[in-house]
Image: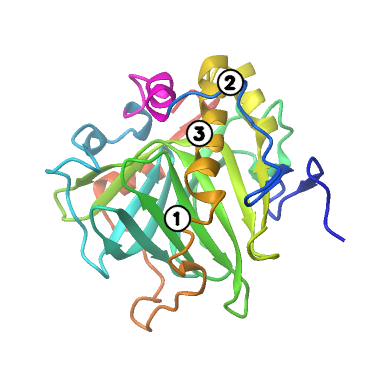
């Protein structure tokens, strides 16, 4: 028996989520009032966004849709950077429409973690953005994932799969439109900022898949702790509504391109390592007393 719209549950990673609709039916508007994509991005723009990466290369980056933005080659290893989170990925395709990458199982990543050794999800939500943190290196666990970043859009789609290779679902990560750069060592990078709120499109019931809203409680707490203004938080919620309108409701691109069952060749599936560069060394050394420091 399927859960009713409005049901709540806990995701595999431990986050709270709510069933907000099914593809093509029953969508519950998330934002207080609808706004345009352009207005949402204006509200979310902050002068310190590039500073959060703590890397001069971010200030040299170019918006992905610009003519002078770097392009990446198929098979090239690049860095996908969310402020303090840095992931090593491999390019499948890069064109005017989107950047598509593969994250093989076991690929390296750097992430901010509580300095006392707890997992982020183990920290009570009202403390999550205020505890001391440090960087730690980890690896991508579980089956590999295809990630698609449509050019100029404030989200990326992560196509998860089960151990047998079958499609498990699609994670719509709300984030700022990407910027691109290449460092002096020739390593490419995309820079963005995670916007806390996410959507999960379950793979079951093809055509009427359940759509879950994830981490709405974290977004509320982020406002309480000053990471977002109330107006910015509602702009993030509006992005979730816009994602549903633009491609979730009718299963449009990039949901219809078969990425959930795409199979890499042997060379593409080798785990990706972080480069031994000055910027990665500096990133490993970062720490702070709260999420607003370091």
Residue 51 covered by magenta stretch: no
Q: Are marks 2 and 1 in contact (CB under 8 Å)?
A: no
In this picture, is 221 found above or below 196? above
Asked which quadrant contains residue 101, the reply is: bottom left
**How far apart, in angstroms, are the residues tagged by discs 2 and 1?**
37 Å
The quadrant the C terminus occupies is top left
User: What's the image's color scheme?
Assistant: rainbow
Answer with left or right where residue 184 lies relative to residue 33: left
The quadrant the N terminus occupies is bottom right
**How far apart, in angstroms, are the residues tagged by discs 3 and 1?**
27 Å
Q: Residue at x 45, y 38 (%)?
A: 175
Span colored in magenta: 37-50
Of marks 2 and 1, the one in the foreground: 2
In this picture, is 163 found above or below 37? below
State which tag comes first along the sequence, 2 or 1: 2
The secondary element bearing badge 3 is classed as: helix
Q: Are marks 3 and 1 in contact (CB under 8 Å)?
A: no
The secondary element bearing badge 2 is classed as: loop
**How far apart, in angstroms, are the residues tagged by discs 2 and 3?**
11 Å
Query: For residue 33, which numbered disc appears in the image?
Result: 2
Check disc 3 and report the residue beneath it. 239
């Amino acid at each position: 028996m399927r859960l009713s719209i409005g049901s709540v549950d806990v995701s595999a990673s431990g986050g709270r989520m709510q069933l907000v609709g099914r593809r093509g039916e029953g969508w519950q508007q998330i934002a207080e009032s609808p706004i345009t994509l352009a207005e949402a991005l204006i509200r979310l723009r902050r002068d310190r966004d590039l500073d959060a990466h703590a890397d001069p290369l971010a200030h040299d980056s170019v918006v992905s849709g610009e003519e002078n933005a770097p392009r990446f080659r198929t098979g090239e290893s690049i860095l996908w950077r969310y402020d303090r989170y840095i992931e090593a990925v491999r390019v499948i395709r890069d064109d005017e429409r989107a950047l598509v990458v593969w994250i093989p199982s076991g690929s390296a990543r750097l992430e901010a973690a509580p300095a006392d050794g707890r997992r982020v999800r183990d920290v009570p939500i009202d403390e999550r953005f205020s505890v001391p943190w440090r960087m730690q290196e980890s690896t991508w666990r579980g089956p590999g994932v295809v990630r698609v970043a449509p050019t100029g859009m404030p989200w990326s789609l992560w196509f998860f799969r089960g151990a047998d290779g079958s499609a498990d679902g699609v994670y719509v990560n709300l984030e700022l439109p990407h910027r691109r750069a290449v460092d002096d060592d020739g390593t490419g990078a995309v820079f963005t900022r995670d916007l806390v709120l996410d959507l999960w499109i379950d793979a079951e019931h093809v055509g009427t898949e359940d759509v879950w809203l994830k981490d709405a409680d974290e977004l509320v707490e982020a406002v309480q702790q000053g990471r977002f203004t109330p107006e910015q938080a509602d702009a993030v919620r509006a992005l979730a509504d816009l994602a549903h309108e633009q491609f979730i409701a009718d299963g449009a691109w990039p949901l219809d391109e078969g990425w959930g069952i795409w199979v890499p060749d042997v060379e593409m599936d080798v785990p990706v390592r972080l480069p031994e560069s000055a910027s990665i060394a500096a990133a490993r050394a970062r720490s702070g007393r709260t999420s607003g420091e370091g």
